[in-house]
Amino acid sequence: MLTEEVLYLPVTELSKRIQARALSPVDLTDGYLDRISKYAARFNAFATVTAELARSQAKQAEEEILAGKYRGPLHGIPYGVKDLAATRGIPTTWGAKPHADQVFDFDATVVVKLREAGAVLLGKLSMVELAGGLGYHFANASLQGPGRNPWDPGRWTGGSSSGPGAAVAAGLVAFAIGSETWGSIVCPSSFCGVSGLRPTYGRVSRHGAMALSWTMDKLGPMCRSASDCRLVLSAISGPDPNDPTASVGPTLRASSSGTPASEFKLGYFPQDFSKNGDKEVDVAVRAAVEELKAAGMKIQEIKLPEGPWEEAAGAVVQCEAASSFEPLFRSGRVKELTEPKAAYAAEVADALTGRDYIKALRIRSVLLGKINKVFEDVDAIVSPGIQYFSTPIDIDLNKALPGSDPVGGIGNLAGLPAACVPCGFGSLGLPAGMVVMGPAYGEETVLRIAEIYQERTRWTERHPKIA
């Protein structure tokens, strides 16, 4: 039986051992499946465990590697995917009761690409119902129950990628695939103390993934480290004939560019913690900024360009979500959702006219120009991931997490990449996260900055004691 320390190793280390035949993909898969059987239910991390499929894929990977047919750094690596990505013959519930029995006869492109890379699918990971597309006030808005944080099961994982956050933090998978429309990778990465990457809009094909907002949805990795995010993103990114929004873009290297810290100029956006937020998060992020400065990076405080970022982003999401989930409203099954106010989401969206939607899109183009000018002076922007630590599981989220999210509003409206990495812990033992956001297709930059930070700190080596 593999030790817990092995199951918490980053993908970069697991892949080295597998390639050197010092670690068996079958043993690694069995180790994760055993851990899943013990702990997954405690955190409501999985919607479906695909044990038989995982063992079959692990056996195939082991046979190929022994035969000298090594596919690359994800060959034989077990993972989980958020339950909004289609998987042939396996339930894809979208975290929502109306879709509890939903089964597709094809795989999402991201699942296909990971299978081609030799990765092993352990199962479908829980999520907030409909990825929060119709709103939610409590953590229990999920078919699988509230996402419970491995650092403290009485607290929330964050959402809507609750399962990926819990599964990576609890050592149930080597990595996970989450999604973000607005905060759904950054929030659980910050709350659960894992490294997450929101890619540039269009960097990863969304074919086969639930549509919430056609112009803002992104799929991305949630891992132990920024280097792991790089490996996974290099495998899943690229054009797809089944998704016209999937862009060619510049190729992302699977290994770090090695750019020295001294070549980076960063803009630090210090959010206001005087009214909202946990001040210990502010302390942790400021200490992380000082660490980047000590590494040799040039850092200056900046202000974000003025504009109705969050208002425009909110209008786009509301309008597009109302369209995406229209069948639920027509059938009346929207009333089956856990969130009682979801039934009124269509009425809220109807209050926004077509003129409002077009205006929001026009505002987006203006604000894109403004944020692009910021990146003429800095390579990336650093800020808190979330201004709060993980919240208690039974609290009203609107009351527990007041305040604005300007960096998230800008980043998601403009489709910009961002890495969220752990940067410290508060007095209650809960992790805090720092975000590094770059210009479109700036994944190489944000990941390299995050890698430098993680090379100088040890936050990624800490994991919760859950046995």
Image (tube, helix red, strand yellow):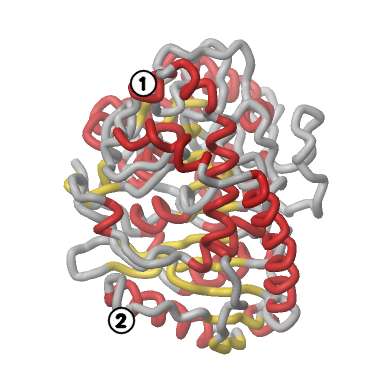
Residue 186: x, y in percent?
Answer: 47, 55
In the rendered image, which quarter is residue 245 located in? top right
Query: Residue at the spot x=54%, y=87% of the render?
Result: 301
Examine the rendered structure and indicate whether residue 447 appears above or below residue 55: below
Dot 1 amino acid type: Lys
Is residue 415 in view from this perspective? no
Q: Quadrant of the C terminus?
A: top left
Q: What element carries label 2?
A: loop
Query: Residue at the spot x=33%, y=78% of the render?
Result: 273
Would you name the residue on which mark 2 appears?
Answer: 274
Q: In which quarter of the image is the N terminus?
A: top left
Residue 371: x, y in percent?
Answer: 68, 72
In the rendered image, which quarter is residue 236 located in? top right
Would you name the residue on which mark 1 appears?
Answer: 97
Is residue 330 in view from this perspective? yes
Dot 2 amino acid type: Ser
**334 displayed left or right of 222:** left
